[in-house]
Amino acid sequence: MTDFALTTPSVLLLLPLALLPLVVSAQRPQSYPSIDDLEIDPLSVALDWALRIAGAIAIAALILGIGGLHRLGRTIEKTGEGAHMVLLIDRSSSMDNTFAGRAPEGGEESKSAAARRLLKDFILRRDHDLLGVAAFSTSPMHVLPMTDHKGAVVAAIDAMDRSGLAFTNVGRGLALALDMQEADTSPAARVILLVSDGAAVIDRKVQETLRAAFARRPINLYWLFLRTEGTPGISTVPGPGEEDTPQAMPERHLDKFFKSLGTSYRAFEAENPEAVAEAIAEISKLERSPITYHERIPHDDLKARCFAVALAALLVLLAARLAEVRLVPATEET
Amino acid sequence: MRERLQDARFWALLAALALTCLALALPRVTLTRDVYDVLAVVDITGSMNTRDMALSGQPVSRIDAAKAALERLLADLPCQSRLGLGIFTERRSFLLFNPIEVCENFAPLETAIQELDWRMAWEGDSMVAKGFYHAITIAEDLKADLVFVTDGHEAPPLPGGGTMLPEFEGTPGKVKGILLGVGGRDKVPLPKFDDEGHEVGTYTADEVPQENRTGAPPPDAHLRPGYHPKWAPFGTDPPSGDEHLTSVRSAYLDTLAASVGFGHVDLVDAPDLLGAISEHARTRPVEVAVDIRPIPAALALALLVGLYAVPFFTARLRMPARRSTASAPPLGAAALRP
């Protein structure tokens, strides 16, 4: 019962006016020679009080209606399927190219535009997820905290195909995504979805930090790798005479590092928008753990109900007024 | 019946009833209100760490003061306004998210503002004018107006003795908005950080570039000692200056704002940010549903209260003359007895 509220609480100062009918009657006072010989009968007393109370109710209901009585919007906990997910988005400038590795022309879609379209579609279909957004290029950037406001997440995804920056600091980006996951203490399933079109060497020191953080709690890691045609992929094995170092083949080694984390990890290598769509559908299928989510119940305007109560009380008063009978001829009209 | 028609109380009650019916039946009225679409871009370069601002008596860094100002702006913006967020460092602005509605998304917006951090920066350079012009092109693309928050500390200094603004490629006046200067009026040393992000003292005069010697020399260069138009166009003295000291560069920000038709206010003057925005930014009219039902309800209330209060006063006034009045009320009810 504590969730009732007034838009203008100051109207409560007027509320004592509702006591007025209890003190004075609005029925017409009538002159009568003497009431000494009239017995006090219970029906009259009851009717008198009923009318007074009707007056009080009418005044109080009008005051509450004017003050904008409403029931507060609430959030209720429900159980559904979903996860707490951090989208970790690569904003390096190579994302501006198409899958074929050129600047988009004609009807072509750049990699980030394709990823953006499909990701938006994905999050809008995931009803109960809590989503956070982080970005990285040369440095990690906190974009949006964990939120269930899909509109905000869509706005952050919309920003992703805008002029990226040069480098890909994936290690620090992951550290930020892990921080965001750790700040949230609910028992829901954790997901980090890394969307990038390349990889980079992760500093040894950062590697150790990441390993420790992933060991602390289970986090499902997905890597959506938007591969440019003809560039080395995750599963490219170095040919004879080629160097097998993180510097020479960052994708292969980043994948190896992720596999060594001992966390649930899957990589999706997508060379075209269709493959991205498939990968996203797959992730959507995999992330179906039970989750408690909050559903907002909008605030309920009770003004109309206040006015209806006031109207009912007024009808009672009017009925009483119509039933009034003059006992003696009027000598003086009030 | 006739008496009833002459009875003012009857009419008052009937009117109150009718007004209450009206309150129940009235639809919402749509009014037009002006809202804003704003992109806020915050300078997060090194100089923004200078602690020469104050928040409720405590010294805070410029970036914290800027965040507090943006949080206040977020709270002040009328509903259905949209706010986007970006950061500026090096020479370009970076959009974090497109403008979103401020009331519905208040919580994530507030946290996103609070999480702005200089550690997001990727270069030590701070080419304010370039970043500002870049932010304007982003805002133009988003059809939003711009609030660019900076201390105006160019590092390295602008060429030509700090007077040559880079070329603005857009159309001045197409995007409107304000430059919000952050920083104290007095010059203070710039704080210095190591690679790990720990503060390690302040910069000295020879650790920062004092003059930009690319491009054309300033017009007064020929007065410098050792000047030679070809071999020493900037003179022979090592550059000197106080670029290692920082304060809000109000005069520079004025020039910069004027170059693109923006307004300029400084946060130290505790400006009314929304007021400044409404003065310089474009508005977008939106229709809002306004509930006008309380108006007839208030009239009904006034009538009803009057109905009860009037006899209260008249009875008191008349008490000595008409004793019976005071004892009359129960009779009204008694008359109903069958």
Image: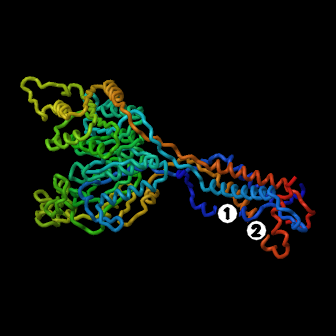
Q: Dot 2 lies on which element?
A: helix
Q: Dot 1 lies on which element?
A: helix
Q: Amino acid at mark 1?
A: Leu
Horizontal and vertical percent position of residue B207: 14, 60
Q: In 3D space, how far apart are the residues under numbered discs 1 and 2 (Cα atoms)?
A: 13 Å
Left/right of residue B299 with respect to residue B319 in the rendered view? left
- Label 2 belongs to which residue? B312
Asked whether residue A296 is in view, the answer is yes
Left/right of residue B297 with respect to residue B200 in the rendered view? right
Query: Dividing the image into 4 quarters, which one contains the N terminus of chain B?
Result: bottom right
Horizontal and vertical percent position of residue A212: 19, 42
The residue under the point 59% across, 53% down is: A68
Q: Amino acid at mark 2?
A: Phe
| Residue sitting nearer the eye, B145 or A316 | A316
What mark, if any, has residue A17 been given in the picture? Answer: 1
Q: Chain of mark 1?
A: A
The residue under the point 42% across, 39% down is: A293
Q: Residue furthest bottom?
A: B320
Residue B297 picture quarter: bottom right
On screen, residue A150 above or below A233: below
Residue A17 picture quarter: bottom right
Asked whether residue A102 is in view, the answer is no
Mark 2 residue crowding within 10 angstroms, few (<14) / some (14–19) / many (20+): some
Left/right of residue A146 with respect to residue B157 in the rendered view? right
